[in-house]
Image (spheres, rainbow, N blue to C red):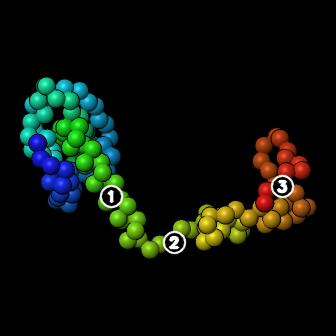
């Protein structure tokens, strides 16, 4: 079997060339191999080896694709797939936006929640709450 750096390069190339998706499979199962060729190293996953079958649906034309992988090759693919996600996040310079528009949530300041603004928004200095239990006397600072 190939060394890890060769497998990682092959996994990256397969995703780049769209031979393999770069997302989680819709379904997967494992067990003894069926002799199908591994999507990463191209060698058969034999019945003496454990492997995974990954199913990806919702492809163009509504078809379903299944890819066999050795356990080691699957681990390498997962590692490379996650690296792609991390790289995409690093490249993205978008700042997180708050769904809260009243200024209580401050993502620009370490994601801190401003309890003082929350109490002030209640109008009476208490903390607004939802549900049947009250939390009187509890400070959120």
Residue name at image x 30 percent, y 48 percent: 78
Q: Where's residue 132, x and y in %?
A: 82, 40
Residue 139, label in figure: 3
Mark whose residue sits in front, 2 or 1:
1
Farthest residue toward the bottom? Answer: 93
**Closest to the observer: 82 or 53?**
82
Q: State whether residue 127 is above or below residue 1.
A: below
Label 1, label 3: how far apart the Cα atoms are: 41 Å
Q: Is residue 65 visible?
A: no
Residue name at image x 36 percent, y 59 percent: 85
* Residue behind mark 2: 95
**Upstream in the sequence, badge 1 or badge 3?**
1
Q: Are marks 2 and 3 in contact (CB under 8 Å)?
A: no
Mark whose residue sits in front, 2 or 3:
3
Indicate the quadrant containing the C terminus: top left, top right, bottom left or bottom right.
bottom right
Farthest residue toward the front? Answer: 3
Find residue 86 and report its image quarter. bottom left
Label 2, label 1: how far apart the Cα atoms are: 20 Å
Q: Are marks 2 and 1 in contact (CB under 8 Å)?
A: no
Label 2, label 3: how far apart the Cα atoms are: 30 Å
Element class at badge 1: helix
Q: Is residue 27 visible?
A: yes
Find residue 28 and report its image quarter. top left
* Residue behind mark 1: 83
Residue name at image x 70 percent, y 62 percent: 113
Q: Where's residue 8, x and y in %?
A: 20, 54
105 relative position to 17: left or right: right
């Amino acid at each position: 079997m190939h060394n890890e750096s060769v497998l990682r390069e092959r996994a990256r190339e397969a995703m780049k060339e769209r031979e393999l998706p770069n997302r989680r499979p819709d379904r997967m199962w494992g067990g003894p191999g069926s002799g199908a060729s591994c999507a990463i190293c191209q060698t058969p996953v034999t019945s003496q080896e454990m492997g995974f079958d990954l199913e990806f649906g919702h492809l163009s034309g509504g078809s379903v694709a299944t890819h066999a992988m050795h356990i080691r090759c699957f681990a390498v693919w997962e590692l490379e797939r996650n690296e792609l996600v991390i790289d995409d996040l690093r490249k993205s310079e978008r700042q997180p936006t708050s769904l809260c528009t009243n200024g209580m949530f401050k993502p620009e300041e370490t994601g801190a929640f401003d309890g003082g603004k929350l109490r002030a928004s209640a109008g009476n200095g208490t903390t607004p709450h939802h549900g049947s239990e009250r939390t009187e006397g509890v400070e959120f600072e």
